[in-house]
Amino acid sequence: MRYGRAPETLKDIAFALPAGSFHFLTGPSGAGKSSLLKLIYLAHRASRGRVELFGRDVSTIRAADQPMIRRRIGVVFQEFRMLEHLSVFDNVALPLRIAGRKPDSYRNDIAELLAWVGLEKRMHALPATLSGGEKQRLGIARAVVNRPDLLLADEPTGNVDHEMALRILRLFVELNRMGTTVLIASHDDDLVAHARKSVLRLERGRLLAPPSASIGNRGGEL
Amino acid sequence: MSESFDVRRWRPGPLLPKRDERDFALTFVVAVLCLLACLTALTAIAADRGARGWSRQLTGSATIVVRPKGAESPDAAAARAAETLAGLKGVTEARALAKADAEELLEPWIGREALLEDLPVPRLVTVELHPETPASAQSLDAALQAAGLDASVDDHSRWIGDIERSAALIRWAAIGVFILIAAAAAATIAFATRAGLAARRDVIEVLHLSGAKAPFIARLFQARFARMSAVAGLFGAAGAAMIGAGLRLAGGGAGLAPVLPLVWSDLAWLLPCPVIAALTAALAARGVAIRLTGELAG
């Protein structure tokens, strides 16, 4: 994968994530962690090679077919990406609204989820009035609200304290238990060590020899 | 504030941000362009009517110059010529001009002093022709000769060609200017819509990454920009209608001037303006939203 005419950001990467697995993606800054996530959540196309999601080749997928794939993916963005004119509650409801769900079918779930991430007193607030940590938790709530098949998180605990980081980790583990495949890009070595999950390590755009059995042959869910 | 948030009463908020000063600027620009396009349309309609009027006036009349013969007085000869022509097929009215009227016509050319009592001023007969089946110059001439009159017929054919060419030129020039202004207005509406939508790229990105399909995003924006342009078009058309009505009232029965005659029903041509502005903006917004979403899709 490359941006414009720049040198390739990612190259010679081959791995598969089995459905329902849990992985961390680590590596120094600039190693290509965010780029790899963008490739997976279809924000970029691979300049060469092949990306399969849910058993489907998405490297050449038509733009019109992308939304249905994307609705199965929850993404926690490093830069939050909120609709600034909407309340916390509305931002979390966004994926469900877009999927065509009726408000009565999810309003209580959202309230419960926001309580879980500690934003129960900020439901009516606008994103601009939230702290970095609150925005982070809002992003997480929005990413998991529709119980995605695949959850991608780019530094999801970068702006929260250790206690909240562990709480967020528990949320991800809980989702994983319910069947969601989880891939978390993180610099937080303590969190990675604490989770004791499979680790993919990227360096200079290449995937180092994977230490766990979850990385290897093509096929599977991802 | 947050403590009072009632989940049961929550209703989804609008997916697009409220209008801001950029949207008001866009509305103003579109309204001004619609006003200009409407005024040009009225001018084109009036110019077309004026041009048709000139041609109709020339082709619908003829002038006869009567020269008395023998003992017959000029006035008697003119009266006889008018009487002869009045009964002719294709003539609706024939009227002999009195000497004073003929002198009045000559005065701009030769002056009052030259109009001596004994100057043989020719007598004129004006003939109004039937608008559908006008009598030809030849038939008028033949009728006058048969009545024993020395007269020559001027059916304005020498000028009609030039006048019709000029009228057509004015008509097409007005239509051309209208098309140019309307096209410029449409292009500017489309451009301004694109600019307004590009400023909301962040919103499009979030919706797109949340799984919204391109037509869903396009519908949001096309509805917003169509409404905005319809309102602007309404203001533009209303402004042009008020100016048109003012000119019609100021000009009396002739409208702005005899050259550009305007009638009340012409204002009805302004009614489609808001719809055309709305459609233009909606199409532009839809096209840009789908293109931007396509770019995001990679």
Image (tube, coloured by chain):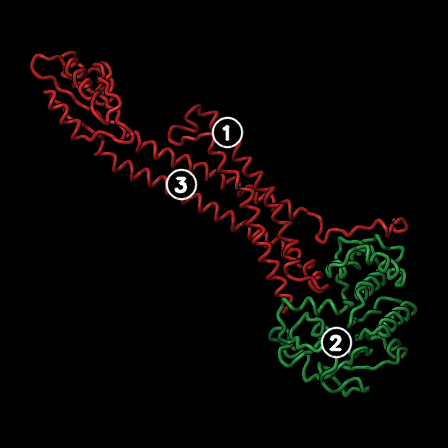
Chain colours: A green, B red
Nearest-to-viewer mark from 2 and 3: 3
Q: Residues within 10 Å of mark 1 (few under 14, many from 20)?
A: some
**Numbered badge on residue A33:** 2
- Separation of marks 2 and 1 at Cα, in angstroms: 68 Å
The local secondary structure at tag 2 comes to helix
Q: Quadrant of residue A13?
A: bottom right
Q: Which chain is disc 1 placed on?
A: B
All told, the count of numbered labels is 3
Nearest-to-viewer mark from 2 and 1: 1
Residue B242 relative to residue B125: left or right: right
Give the residue at mark 3.
Answer: B174
Place of residue B264 in the rendered image (x, y in percent of width and height, measured from the top left): 47, 30
Place of residue A200 in the rendered image (x, y in percent of width and height, measured from the top left): 79, 82
- Work out whether residue B234 or residue B189 is closer to the camera in this orientation and state it: B234
Give the residue at mark 1.
Answer: B245
Q: Do the residues marked 2 and 1 share a common chain?
A: no
Q: At 73% from the left edge and 87% from the top edge, which residue is drawn?
A: A217
